[in-house]
Image (cartoon, rainbow, N blue to C red):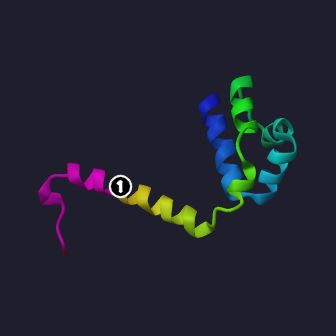
């Protein structure tokens, strides 16, 4: 469950500037407010993140990365499909 909690914290931080500010001010309270529990080691790792750098990410950067991952996943699926199922109509 802890890996899922860390994923939730990172996802929220990537998409919510207010949450990033909360993390920078008091990461333990921000995580608690999100309603998840992380281990002390994970808390230290989150605290060590440079939240200011996250503010520099543009929505285009994030969408570009998501698009690349999605394309890769689709190519994995279609490369495993029988050729008779992949037809251009």
Membership of 81 in magenta stretch = yes
Q: Residue at x 68, y 62 (%)?
A: 56
State the image quarter where residue 58 is shown.
bottom right
Q: Residue 88: x and y, percent?
A: 18, 72
Residue that carries the numbered disc 1 in the rendered image: 72
Q: Nearer the viewer, residue 39 or 51?
A: 51
Q: Residue at x 74, y 50 (%)?
A: 51
Quadrant that contains the C terminus: bottom left
Membership of 46 in magenta stretch = no
Q: Residue 60 vs residue 72: left or right?
A: right
Q: Residue 74 vs residue 47: left or right?
A: left
Residue range (magenta): 72-88
The answer to whether residue 37 is visible is no
Determine the main secondary structure of the stretch shown in magenta: helix
Q: Nearer the viewer, residue 85 or 17?
A: 17
Q: Is residue 82 above or below residue 34?
A: below
């Amino acid at each position: 469950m802890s890996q899922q909690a860390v994923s939730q914290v990172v996802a929220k931080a990537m998409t919510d500037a207010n949450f990033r500010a909360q993390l920078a001010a008091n990461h333990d309270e921000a995580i608690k407010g999100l309603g998840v529990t992380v281990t002390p080691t994970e808390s230290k790792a989150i605290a060590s993140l440079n939240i200011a750098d996250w503010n520099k990410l543009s929505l285009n950067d994030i969408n570009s990365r998501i698009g690349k991952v999605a394309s890769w996943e689709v190519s994995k699926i279609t490369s495993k499909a029988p050729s008779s199922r992949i037809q251009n109509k």
